[in-house]
Amino acid sequence: MERTFAIVKPDAVAAGNAGAILHEIEKAGFKIVALRMTRLSREQAAGFYAVHKERPFFNGLLDFMTEGPVVLMALEAPDAVKAWRDLMGATNPEKAAEGTIRKKFGTNIERNATHGSDAAETAAFELGYFFRGYELR
């Protein structure tokens, strides 16, 4: 079993799609190990997305990720990182495969409903960033 980190982003929460996305996650065979709805502070978002700090879209990303509540999740499944990325679909919903979460619930490349770790090392950092160890037992 492997764990990965996922976020239902503010656009999907505001549109009332968080429950449908959670349903898709469970239907795909993931175990939701930890889950919390919160509203990120700008500082939290900046720390989380620090890897993008020098990119031109950074401030817009922070504005977006702090505009409303998000749902943070620890997911578990065999090959969870790849499985979650496959279920999410391409970053750009217009290019995402039919049936993927981003195709169903995303609006555009910036408002694409979900986030997922891109590697096991990234997942370890992201899980630790938002969840305390005892929450992941």
Image (spheres, rainbow, N blue to C red):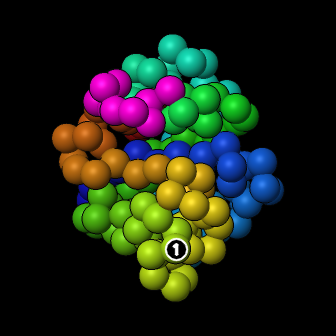
Q: Which residues are magenta?
A: 51-59
Q: At 50% from the left edge and 19% from the top edge, which residue is drawn?
A: 44
The answer to whether residue 111 is left or right of residue 95 is: right
Taking the magenta stretch, the answer to whether it contains residue 123 is no
Please name the residue shown 56% across and 18% down the image. 42
Residue 97: x and y in percent read 45, 82
Most extreme residue toward the bottom, as rendered? 98
Direction top: furthest residue: 43
75 lies above or below 48? below
Q: Position of residue 47 (x, y in %)?
A: 40, 20
Coordinates of residue 104 in the picture (x, y in percent): 62, 74
Q: Residue at x 53, y 46 (%)?
A: 7
Residue 115 visible here: yes
Q: Residues within 10 Å of mark 1 (few under 14, many from 20)?
A: some
Q: Label 1, on which residue? A: 94
Residue lying at 31% horizontally and 26% vertically, measured from the top left: 54
View extreme (left): residue:
121
Q: Is residue 47 left or right of residue 41?
A: left
Percent of width and height locating residue 62 = 54, 28
Assign a secondary structure to mark 1: loop
**Lateral position of residue 91 relative to residue 60, left or right:** left
Q: Amino acid at mark 1?
A: Glu
Q: Is residue 99 above or below residue 25?
A: below
Of residues 3 and 126, the one nearer the viewer is: 126
| Magenta span contains residue 53 | yes
In depth, the one of 28 and 94 nearer the eye is 94
Placement of the C terminus among the 4 image quadrants: top left
